[in-house]
Image: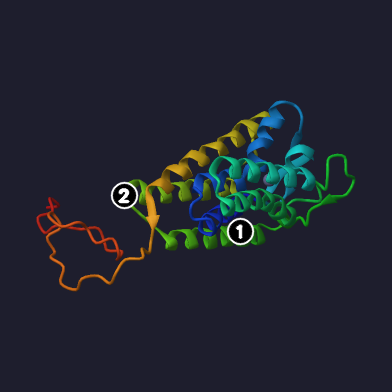
Amino acid sequence: MFLGHYGVAFAARRVAPRTSLGTTVFAAQFLDEIWPILLLAGVERVRIVPGLMAASPMDFVSYPISHSLLTAALWALLIGAVYAAVRRYGRGAWVAGLAVLSHWLLDAPMHRPDLPLWPGSHTLVGLGLWNSVPVTMLLELGLFTLGLAWYARGTRPRDRVGRWGLWAMVAVLIGIFLSGLQGAPPPNERAVAVMALGLWLFVPWAAWVDRHREPAMRAEPAPVPSAPRDGATTPASPSLPSPPPRSPASPRR
Ligand SMILES: [Zn+2]
């Protein structure tokens, strides 16, 4: 799974509102973030087999450290514990840990039976839904859209970064997903690893966007009905989402 993990990250940020979207993206995609490092180190292995599955040409030969259920649970514990120690926010620690574990649980329906229960386990898990492009699109886009919509409804942009930074990230993620479905398979295994390292970029990107958004609803008293419309001298009322101000003397001629 790819996009669905970001859907989880968006939703996790709603569940733990004091946790950054950067943290939840880091956690929900953690297994795929360490995977290319382990590939480049020669610890894990992948092969490109064009046509292997309708929605993925990847033959995950061996990935016991990044993608076994046991190690996923251990990574989840580690990240939850580190988060708790650093941030002292229990809910955020639970959410970060569960987001790490959710990655394995969401990969399991998509992958062929290649996900081990523990390193060395001969029991390999996977339902193989990547064999169907329509099912893949439905699940990936569905999960992504649900999480994103929940996040976007609960927060609102403070400025252009909060608005356009978010939609640019969404566009790039969907672009990566669609090009993976439609495009030619990667030229070689090393290219797969190097491209997968790019997933790390979404961690600071998500954190940056999130810092430029704020809760959509504030516990404010009811708005004053006849507030002066002179925006230059009064502080903007933060309680209602309003369209961007457009002055009549707009220089659009
Ligand atoms: Zn994965």
| Relative horizontal placement of residue 149, taking residue 228 as reference (left or right) | right
Q: Amino acid at mark 1?
A: Met
Residue found 68% across the figure and 36% down from its top: 35
| Relative horizontal placement of residue 59, taking residue 89 as reference (left or right) | right
| Relative horizontal placement of residue 217, taking residue 28 as reference (left or right) | left
Please give the residue where the numbered disc 2 appears in the rendered image. Answer: 159
Q: Is residue 54 above or below residue 47?
A: below
Residue 223 in percent (x, y) is at 25, 70
> Is ligand 1 within 8 Å of the beta carbon of the residue shown at mark 1?
no
| Relative horizontal placement of residue 68, taking residue 195 as reference (left or right) | right
Closer to us: mark 1 or mark 2?
Answer: 2
Residues packed near mark 1 inside 10 Å, few (<14), some (14 to 19) or many (20 plus) = some
Dot 1: element: helix
Give the number of the disc on residue 202. Answer: none
Identify which residue, 86 or 147, lies in the foreground: 86
Please give the residue where the numbered disc 1 appears in the rendered image. Answer: 137
Residue 221 in percent (x, y) is at 29, 69
Residues packed near mark 2 inside 10 Å, few (<14), some (14 to 19) or many (20 plus) = few
Identify which residue, 158 or 243, lies in the foreground: 158
- Type of colouring: rainbow
